[in-house]
């Protein structure tokens, strides 16, 4: 399957453990991707495509997804909103834990890097977006000569359409950008 990624914007956040579990459970990858190498360097997570095609040079940089890793405190229950404890009273501690999150945030060049196998790695990101409980993934892609709009909000696929319109101020040249507005991509 051939394809291109024209626009992409992501604000996805999910526990790092969920990302690692996803790849450990042998996910169904696009046919062009044999495997995904998961590497962590300090506070950066890199998911690099391993090409299934032997004709792709081992020196060609394949597409990779890049996420920052942050640590957030997650509470088992909502903290009380009452005022400060009175003098002599102890503040009740709410059970919590520190959880590492993978944050796929930014535009195409920030989140999805390199062009070889870029579309198949977008498909991997789309599957990751479906397990994310926080954030949004929006994209305009082309596959098999058709444009597709993608919009996933907090793990749920939402309707998205692409509407191509001519820009009358440009004399019908159609050279306007593509924008997101009211569940539609406008070009």
Image (cartoon, grey):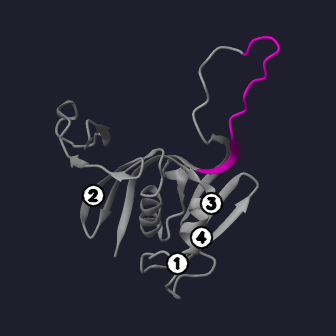
In the image, the segment drawn in magenta is 85-102
Camera sees residue 69: yes
Query: Which numbered disc covers residue 17?
Result: 3
Q: Is residue 50 magenta?
A: no
Distance, label 3 to label 1, CA atoms, is 15 Å
Q: Residue at x 27, y 57 (%)?
A: 148
Mark 1 and 4 residues: CB-CB less than 8 Å, in contact?
Answer: no
Q: Secondary structure at mark 2?
A: strand
Mark 4 to mark 3 CA distance (whole Å): 26 Å
Closer to the camera, 151 or 185? 151
Q: Do tag 3 and tag 1 residues touch (Cβ < 8 Å)?
A: no
Q: Main secondary structure of the magenta part?
A: loop
How far is mark 4 from mark 2, CA to CA?
26 Å
- Residues tagged 4 and 3 counted as in contact (Cβ below 8 A): no
Q: Which badge, 2 or 1, is on the more N-terminal residue?
A: 1
Q: Nearer the viewer, mark 4 or mark 3?
A: 3
Q: Position of residue 42 (x, y in %)?
A: 76, 54
Pick whichever, 151 or 61, lies toward us: 151
The tag earlier along the polypeptide, 4 or 2, is: 4
User: How far apart are the two marked residues, 3 and 2, measured between alpha carbons?
Assistant: 30 Å
Asked whether the residues under the numbered discs 3 and 2 touch, taking CB atoms below 8 Å apart as contact, a structural biologist would say no
Which mark lies nearer to you, 1 or 4?
1
Find disc 4 in the rendering and name its residue: 61
**Circle 2/circle 1 CB separation < 8 Å:** no
Q: Which residue is mark 1?
A: 26
> Going from the N terminus, do you reach mark 4 or mark 3 first?
3
Q: Is residue 78 above or below residue 51?
A: above
Closer to the observer: label 3 or label 2?
3
């Amino acid at each position: 399957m051939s394809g291109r990624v024209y626009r992409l914007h992501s604000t996805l956040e999910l526990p790092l453990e969920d990302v690692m579990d996803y790849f450990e459970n042998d996910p169904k990858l696009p046919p062009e991707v044999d495997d995904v190498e998961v590497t962590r360097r300090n506070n950066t997570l890199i998911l690099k495509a391993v090409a299934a095609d032997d004709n792709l040079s081992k020196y060609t940089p394949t597409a990779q997804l890049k996420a920052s890793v942050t640590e957030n405190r997650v509470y088992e229950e909502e903290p009380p909103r009452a005022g400060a404890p009175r003098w002599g009273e102890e503040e009740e501690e709410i059970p919590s834990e520190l959880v590492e999150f993978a944050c796929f945030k930014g535009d195409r060049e920030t989140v999805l890097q390199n062009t070889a196998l870029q579309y198949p790695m977008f498909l991997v990101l789309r599957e990751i977006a479906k397990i994310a409980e926080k954030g949004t993934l929006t994209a305009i892609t082309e596959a098999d000569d058709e444009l597709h709009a993608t919009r996933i909000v907090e793990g749920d696929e939402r309707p998205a359409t692409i509407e191509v319109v001519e820009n009358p101020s440009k004399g019908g040249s159609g050279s306007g950008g593509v924008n997101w507005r009211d569940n539609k991509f406008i070009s």
